[in-house]
Image (spheres, helix red, strand yellow):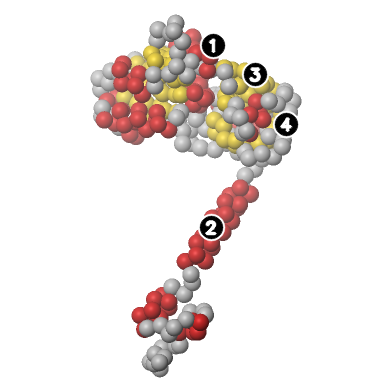
Amino acid sequence: MSLSLSPSLPSSSSLCPNAHLRPSLPPMSILRCLAHPFPRRLNLRRHRFASVAAAAVRQDTTVWTPAPLSEVEPAAESLFHVTVDLSDSPDLAASHTRAGQYLQLRVPDGSKPSFLAIASPPKLASARGVFEFLVKSVPGSTAEILCGLKRGAVVELSQVMGNGFDTSRIDPPAKYPTVFIFATGSGISPIRSLIESGFSAAERSDVMLYYGARNLQRMAYRDRFKDWESSGVKIVPVLSQPDGNWTGENGYVQAAFTRTKQITDPLSTGAVLCGQKQMTEEVTSILTADGVSSDKILKNF
């Protein structure tokens, strides 16, 4: 026997497609179908399509600028110095205004763009018309292709992105005399930009850079350490897999910091972090547990 419906309600077949192919529905099932007339799977497909379409729109807004490479040289094991000539793109060069900013780079074969932090200070872009990068060559990646290119090869750069390190949050130097800087691997790239941009390190009493790498062969910018220390930054190299002759700090950066840290006044302490996620999270936890304000811990993302 079929269920008799109230005259005020439409039939089940008008509410749900193919309702005539299954037993008649009781009133509550009809109401549920009315509240959800489309299958959930269809809604999920529409959501995925909308996400893909939105991503495509965002990709289409990227402005790409062709520029030649002026240098590709080894910087350390698996790391390369890459310099891009922007003499024909002064507007792009001028858009780099703060250490810690980054951009996307495409190579000629059209592979997926690679995100790269700008290693050179902003003043170098305005003075010489170049961007410098420290690139880790990862097998199978755009970065590997980039590191294999020769001088004169043309790559494409996106617009400069990000807010960089907002050092105004740890100014003036007299109020924040202690600044701890942390970097691991190629994360030293934007830290180089910060140090060489100048953030009044010489006017602060205690500025220390904890720089982690697997070994000395993988530690880039060692030739710059003397100049960095002359600018007021004390450098603490930390090696996770040192050879037998190493007498400095070993293990991970966060462990080395825990062993050696001396935070006498957390309210006058700032920090700058760039590198592996685990390192940045653990160092942030250590600092905040000691009373350093999270607003004074600078990151470039």
Which disc, if any, is residue 75? none
Which disc, if any, is residue 154? 4
Between 217 and 286, the residue placed more toward the observer is 217
Residue 40 x/y as whole percent: 47, 66
Q: Which residue is mark 3?
A: 73
Q: Give the mark nearest the N terminus, 2 or 1.
A: 2
**Amino acid type indicated by mark 2:** Arg
Q: What separation in Å lies between label 4 and label 2 (alpha carbons)?
A: 35 Å
* Mark 3: few/some/many CA within 10 Å (<14, 14-19, 20+): some
Q: Which residue is mark 2?
A: 48
Q: Disc 2 on helix, strand or loop? A: helix
Q: Give the mark nearest the N terminus, 3 or 2.
A: 2
Whether the residues at callouts 4 and 2 have beta carbons within 8 Å, the answer is no
Q: Residue furthest top?
A: 245
Q: What separation in Å lies between label 3 and label 2 (alpha carbons)?
A: 42 Å
- Residue 42 visible from this viewpoint: yes
**Amino acid type indicated by mark 3:** Glu
Which disc, if any, is residue 223? 1
Q: Disc 1 on helix, strand or loop? A: helix
Whether the residues at callouts 3 and 2 have beta carbons within 8 Å, the answer is no
Q: Disc 4 on helix, strand or loop? A: strand
Q: What separation in Å lies between label 2 and label 1 (alpha carbons)?
A: 49 Å
Determine whether 139 is above or below 62 in the image. Answer: above
